[in-house]
Image (tube, helix red, strand yellow):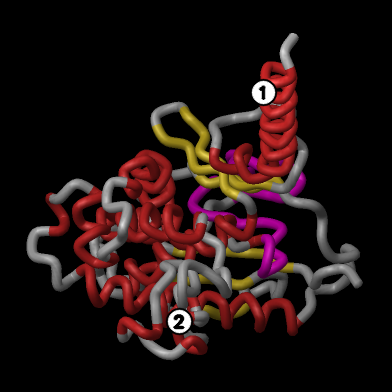
Amino acid sequence: MSSRRRGRARGVGAVAAVLAVGVVATAGVVWVLSGRDSGSTAPRCAATLDGTDWYFSPVQAENAALVTGVAIQRGLPARAATIGLATALQESRLVNIDYGDRDSLGLFQQRPSQGWGTPEEIMDPVYSTGAFYDGLVEVEGYEDMEVTVAAQAVQRSAFPDAYAQHETRARAWASALTGHSPGSVTCELPPVGDDGPVDAAAQAAFVERVERDLGLPPGSSVRPSEDGTGVVVDATALPVDDDARAAWAAAHWAVATASVTGAVEVRVADRAWTRADATWRTTDGDPVPAGQVVAVVEPARG
């Protein structure tokens, strides 16, 4: 073999080695954005649509719950949430990152230099999500546009067609988190708490998160259950025209955010999700009143 061929062979080998390392290094990200992987035991959440499970990491799931919750608060259609989720998936993989191209930041990679807000504002996921929807509702007819066209109208990305690849995943999560697909959000999470008495601080943190994401303030809309073991969310206060769908929207939100709220059980109608089962099952006894959700939360260990 000539020295030129040997050099070329070594070059190809080096490239192959680099690619192999890259595949290993990115495997942890790829599985989150793939379909079902029955061999995985890492914490994860799924939204099921047409028999397919679309997985997120717990961090992605809680951010998806926020992005959709803000759309619900504003009375926007599920299509708006689909567009928001697809956009955030493309821009940041639905993770609130503090870096990006040039001065881009946050879930939607908004740029302070382009008038989206201060760096501190953009790094607030509530603010950045609201800013995205502020732009989206100004796009006439966005509800009937292709996802990538509507997203591009807001973002003005250098890669305008990239949003389309996330449409099905975004639609699965938007459908579930807006209550259109009952019993379709599940999470596989490690246990929390020590099975001790209900912790008031944990309940207070849950209530604060409900107010942030869904706009339901403490009081009649969010209150301790009568037996003191859980938190009742009255989803009928949401701007949703169907009480059953509103309840499922709140219930799916509670499951998707369980990794940060410490929720160990979520009950709606005659169904319940628990960390132990990691799925929805029919419950015994009286169902939860129509339009309401009951969540049991425990303090995190340590």
Where, by quadrant of the figure, is residue 267 drawn?
Answer: bottom right
Residue 41 in percent (x, y) is at 77, 38
Residue interval drawn in magenta: 259-285
Residue under the image location 45 percent in, 71 percent down: 234
Question: Of 17 and 142, which appears nearest the observer?
Answer: 17
User: Residue most toward the top?
Assistant: 1
Sequence order check: which comes first, mark 1 or mark 2? Answer: 1
Question: What residue would you read off at disc 2?
Answer: 122
Tell me which amino acid carries mark 1.
Arg
Q: Residues within 10 Å of mark 2 (few under 14, many from 20)?
A: many
Image quarter in which the N terminus is found: top right
Position of 199 with respect to 170 (left or right) is: right
Residue under the image location 31 percent in, 86 percent down: 115
Tell me which amino acid carries mark 2.
Ile
Is residue 272 visible to us here?
A: no
Image quarter in which the C terminus is found: bottom right
Position of 128 with respect to 204 (left or right) is: left
Position of 263 with respect to 105 (left or right) is: right
The label on residue 8 is 1
The question of residue 275 being in magenta is answered with: yes
Q: Secondary structure at mark 2?
A: helix
In the rendered image, the vertical position of residue 151 relative to residue 148, given as above or below: below
Q: Nearer the viewer, mark 1 or mark 2?
A: 1
